[in-house]
Image: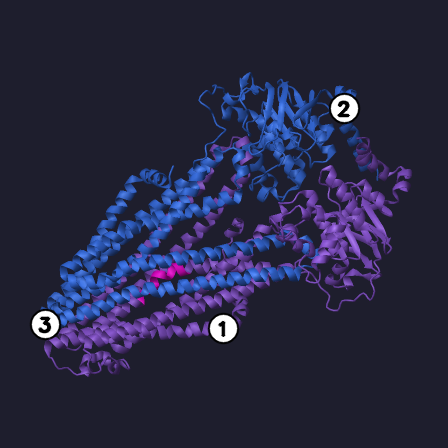
Amino acid sequence: MTPITRLLSYVRRVPGSYALGAALTVVYAGCFQLVPLSVRNLVGHFESPESQPSLALGALWVMGAALLLAIFRMASRMVLFRTAREIEFQLRNDLFHHLQTLPQSFFARNRTGDLMSRGVNDINSIRLFLGMGLMNIFQTPVLILGALSVMMWVDWRLTLAVAIPYPIFTFVVRLYGRRLHAASLATQEQLGEVSTAVQENAAGVLVARAYHMEDRERERFETENERLYRRHMRLAIVQGLMQPTIGMLPAIALLMVLLVGGWRVEAGALSQKDLWLFYIYVAMLTFPTFMLGWVFALAQRGLAGLQRLGEVLDWVPSIRDRPDVEPMEGVLGRVEVENLSFVYPDRELKSLSGIHFRARPGQTIGIVGRVGSGKSTLVNLIPRVLEVPDGTIFMDGVDVNRVPLLALRSSIAMVPQESFLFSTSLGENIRFGCPDAPLEEVRDAARRAHLLDEIEDLPFGLETPVGERGITLSGGQRQRVALARALILDPAILILDDALSSVDAITEESILKDLRRAREGRTCFIVAHRLTAVRDADYILVLEDGELAEEGTHAELLRKGGAYAELHRQQRLEAEIEAGD
Amino acid sequence: MELGLHEEEAVGKVYDARLIQRLWPFLRPYRGLLIAALLLVPVRAVLESVPGILIGVALNSLSLGAAADAASSETVGGMLARIPGVTALTSPPDGFSVIAWLALLFGIFTLLSLGLEFARMLAMAWLGQSGMRDLRSLLFDHVQRLPMSFFDRYPVGRLVTRLTNDIETVSEMFTGGVVALIGDLLLMAFFACMLFWVDPRLAAVAMGVVPFLAVAATIFRWKVRQAFREVRIKIARLNTHLQETISGMKVVQLFAREARNLADFEETNSSHRDSWFRSIRYDALLSSSVELATNLTIALILWYGGNAVLGRSLEIGVLFVFVDWMRRFFRPMQDLSARYSVMQSSMASCERVFELLDVEPESSNDAPTRLAEFRGEVEFDSVSFAYGEETVLDDVSFRISPGERVAIVGPTGAGKTTILKLLIRLYEPQRGSIRIDGVDIRELSRRELRTHLAYVPQDVFLFTGDLKYNISLGRPDISDAQVGEAAAVVHADHVVHRLPNGYGQQVLERGLNFSAGERQLLSFARALAQQPQILLLDEATANVDTQTEALIQDALHQLLQGKTSIVVAHRLSTIQDVDRIFVMHHGRIQETGTHETLLAERGLYWRLYQLQYAGADAA
């Protein structure tokens, strides 16, 4: 979608508002003409001394015009600005909604900061364009056309004299605008250099301190800082020149009123009241004319913002329900994986290849292997967090790609490797997947995650806020909150992706024991580093470089004396070292 | 981009005398500019009042011209002649018609006033930018002196925001905030006085609307302010929600929470929109009432003044002057709310910048001891160190003689790296003392300590800049030849030679154009080039190809040659190279000895050896 069509599609959502805004603007432009005309009428009475009574009437006319003008100014502003805010509201909702449909591969490619800047800065510039920008695009031409016709009707010669500087100045202002843009771009770039310098200084602080580089770092920063200062000053000069230059426009117009108008009055071709009319016009048109010059920049920025936002909004979600979706309410937990291979986008090497296994409800599958062997990839494919190739994973006999996404994910609970918590309370985090769960269930889930005692020791209990990303909790606590968040769902399939790595071995042991007791009819996948976690699994998969190296029960794998047995030996040694002090 | 969203909720007060006071030292050196800019305000006010007078005089002359052809310049001025200098100025010299002369003056004064405006803006920019440059320098300087523990908890992004965007925002105070506001108020006061000077009665009428406008403006501004505060809180909440959802998208999707999450977002979003609706209403009211007041005032002046003109007690030119001046009087009121919001965000940024400046820097002793002759004896005497509540080193004591090479081994988290960091005083131990050649390192200056010691951290950090800079670290006393020599000893020259630009090769951000192995060799060269007497090395664990591994092993061997060295070691070859091995566990040194004696003890070291190297030997 081009920025313009997207813009129009949003404008079409609020058709009445823009029509009303446009109508109000036209009425405003009409009232605008009344002010100079009524002033002219009022001053006209000065010329005949006997007209004293009509002076009051003339003044009332001016006041009436002023009141009308104020009312319509307010109304048109309110309507147009509100409409801009309304569209901003919808755009932001749409962005949010769309982001939620995008796959992990999208978020891997687009950094949070960049997405935030689209959601904040770009939406802002779009809104400015839609409000201030569109208002002026509607308004100013109508104002100017109306004014020109009135002025022409009064005296076309003086009108020409007054109006000629305007087009010339618009040109000059645009030229300046380009220089201003270049200067402010240069300043922005230098600001980027300064932030890089700070960033690097902070990132390399260890080396900088160890090698007492503070002075040299300072010098490097000073160079950038000084350059920033100079760019700022250059920008200030361009800006400083631009404002007086713009200020010259009404001044020249007034000069023309004085000089040409004065001559015309002297020559008897014009009366004084006409000079007043021109004066009021020049005064009242000054600001709208400036705005017109600014509108170009607004429109440019707004359209660029729409373009950048469009890049996100047009990203087709690769993981969603397809037309051939099978109507299912949920899954029971029979998982079959057949000849599954997976390559991450942008990577050449396969992360998984030829994986093959089956899991029945009630079974626990342990998955072990070295870092980077594909364990996490494998379990992330099951809830379709990653794009699953067709015909490789089956849920209750149905290709997982044909299971409705909502049905699939609400039957699976996963504790991901990185236990991300939201900055709400402990209770809210545990309730995350079922916001309306009663307190008793929350407490029960916390109990099963061996968290309840600690929570009850806190002064605010479940209401305790966890801070950004759960920063107020320890790593082990975070993992157990994430576990409780999964357990409360009572899912058909439970996936623990190395989910208890920061929990001590004894607690891990007893959590898993409880899980075993309660896993009736549930399919469990446990990815683990510590073999103790998978020792009691019904079946263990050992991955090596994305391939299934060994499989079997704990006892079988030990007997085999392969990779699993070696891992087992190492971990026993580690445990001995840990205990040996 | 870091937005510091969470702090936005704490929006500071608009005007805070304390903040201005703290800001003043940065402006003081440039106070001449500030005074000049403030002095320019009255001059500008005078100049701005002139065009009105000129046109007023012209109108007088035109109406007289219609009545009588020979009018003296005094009558042309009329009431306006009460303004000093007007008569002298507006009487045309020979050869000029009145209109042409007035037009010429108009042009001159316009140019003067615009020129002055340029000068004023430049002075303000100069003041603001100079002050901000100094503040930024000072802040950077301050950051250089903050303890390492500060960097462990303060996100880099936030630091960058403080030094860039926040200071930029503070500088806006000078271009669009306080100073502009003072200028506006002075200008308004000037025009009010002038009006009363010329004709008190007409001035009283002209000012008739002002009290109403003032009341209305106060109310609306107060309402706008409230709405604006609400908006800021809501936008912060909205952006936090957006950011959190983006970062935690996987969890949102896994738990099928999208619909609920969207509903929550829409709710905040719509209340944000509604706050804006309120703000728009008051803003529109405010701007319309200023316009209304202006036009009503014109009507009042022309009505009341018109009667006087008809009664021949006032000239029409005076009316014009009144109309023109009142318009100029009202104009700044249009900008008030914009100025207000600039000031508000400036103050908030100002507060955040000063908060960072208030973080206590590292202690430094004023009269450091100097080591007469450096031998390189290192001693830890009952050193304990805790990071937060977690004990990392627990009563560690050892002595290393000059020239001795020591390896520290042990499981992860045993406190190995901490020994190195304490020795170069990146952190201070809570108990015990560390001595070099018998002198407590706290008595030395950090600079002196660190010139004798070279620390090679586990993660190699390369600076942007060329390779030469990364090896010499910008020290002017290290020659190109020395850089080359150091690189050659540790085989980093292999890396350099394959590059098209040799030592001039630019390093990309964080050394992304070099492999992990190459980065390690470069960091060895860096340490060697600094010619340290004591080498502290934290061996990297990154996997490298066998060829590079061989290079690194030999490089390490060269590096440790004849130098007091402490190495946190992971390689068997390194361990076999050293004179003594410390085996650490749970923050204590559990065993010491050589490779052979430790193996023979069959204790912790033996088990570690089994775990880490025995398998590798077999392979």
3D distance between C-alphas at marks 2 and 3: 117 Å
Going from the N terminus, do you reach mark 2 or mark 3 first? 3
Residue drawn at x 43%, y 63% is A236
Q: Is residue B602 left or right of residue A485?
A: right
Q: Is residue A326 left or right of residue A132?
A: right
Q: Is residue B494 left or right of residue B283?
A: right
Residue at the spot of label 3:
A49
Asked if residue A168 lies in the magenta stretch, the reply is no
The magenta span reads B329-339
- Across and down, in percent, residue B606 comes to 86, 37
Which mark, by number, is residue A562?
2
Q: Nearer the viewer, mark 1 or mark 2?
A: 2
Q: Identity of the amino acid at label 1?
A: Arg
The image shows a total of numbered marks equal to 3
Which image quadrant for residue B596? top right
Residue at the spot of label 1:
B31
3D distance between C-alphas at marks 1 and 3: 57 Å
